[in-house]
Amino acid sequence: MSPAASETRAGGRRHVDLRIATYNIHRARGMDRRVSPARIAEVLREIDADIIALQEVVGAGPSGSGQAEEIGAALGMGWVMAPVRHLRKHLFGNVIMSRFPVLHHTQYDLSWRTCEERACQRADLDIGDGRLVHIYNVHLGTAVLERRYQAPRLAAFVHDHRVTGPKIILGDFNEWMRGLATKTLSALFNSIDIQEHLRRRRTYPGFFPVLHLDHIYYEGHVEVRSVDLPRTRRALLASDHLPLVANLRVGFDR
């Protein structure tokens, strides 16, 4: 059990409180054009989440280790990466960071035609006594037709009957209006409506956010306790997105 997570019992069900975050770090390039994984790590340290889904992360390559390694070391968190392509000979893709052991890790191809490669990353986390939470880290495409293809494909992967237990789907969905992808996913999963929790709810671009691209969906016994959109000076500069944070209470039957 993570020091930051707590467990309670109610109605014969065990509940674990988790703090999760999704953050497109834009290759750690800030709004001031400066590339600084250390600054990203400071934003995340202030958030103090148990589980973090990152998008647009530069991985290892010929010139050395990647940003996930640096950020993970700074936070003292384990991590797994799902690369989708190479960027200047370095791996590039999604990363899940966790204070819990990762028991299984995989990725699903969401690429469409000639558009940029995309994927959904899945990590199965043991949050104590063998109880699993499944995290799906998503970065959908920028084209409408691309997302129209990706949304039902993503849903099919998440609805794999062989994967049981609470599921959290989060990331950069690249949809700022209630388009087909949002309608599809909202019909199939519970979604966090941040309008119910926040006055300021836009996450992109970072310094002066005018669009809401980042979302969190879930399936199973999950209760949304609170939602946060950190707007510190550092967070406003560190990336072209703001991190989206949620405190969840996840229930298990044993």
Image: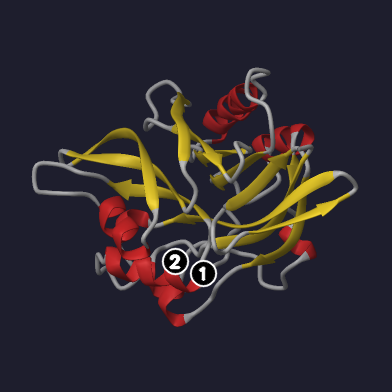
Q: Are marks 2 and 1 in contact (CB under 8 Å)?
A: yes
Q: Relative to 166, does residue 110 appear above or below in the rendering?
A: above
Please rate how many residues cluster around mark 1, counting C-alpha atoms within 10 Å: few if below 14, some from 14 to 19, many from 20.
some
- In percent of the image, x 80 and y 63: which residue is there? 196
Residue sitting nearer the eye, 39 or 132: 132
The residue lying toward the viewer, choosing from 222 and 121, is 222
Inspect the image, locate mark 1, and give the three-letter code of the amino acid beneath it. Answer: Ile
**Image coordinates for residue 59, horizontal then vertical, percent:** 25, 45
Check residue 47 in the rendering and tell me which mark sits there, or answer none. 1
> Looking at the picture, how far across and down is residue 222, in whole percent?
75, 47
User: Residue at the location (72% across, 69% down)?
Assistant: 198
Q: Residue furthest right?
A: 11
Kindly identify the residue that appears in the image at 43 percent across and 70 percent down. 45
Q: Position of residue 94 (x, y in %)?
A: 40, 42
Quarter of the image that includes the C terminus: top right
| 135 in relation to 104, above or below | below
Q: How many numbered dots are placed on residues in this image?
A: 2
Under circle 1, the secondary element is: helix
What is the CA distance from the residue labelled 2 to the residue labelled 1?
Answer: 5 Å
The residue at 61%/59% (across/down) is 5
Figure quadrant of residue 201: bottom right
72 lies above or below 237: above
Left or right of residue 80: residue 203: right
Q: Which mark is residue 44?
A: 2
Q: Is residue 62 above or below residue 9?
A: above
Residue at the outermost left position:
63
Q: Quadrant of residue 186?
A: top right
Which label is found at residue 252? none
Tell me which amino acid carries mark 2: Leu
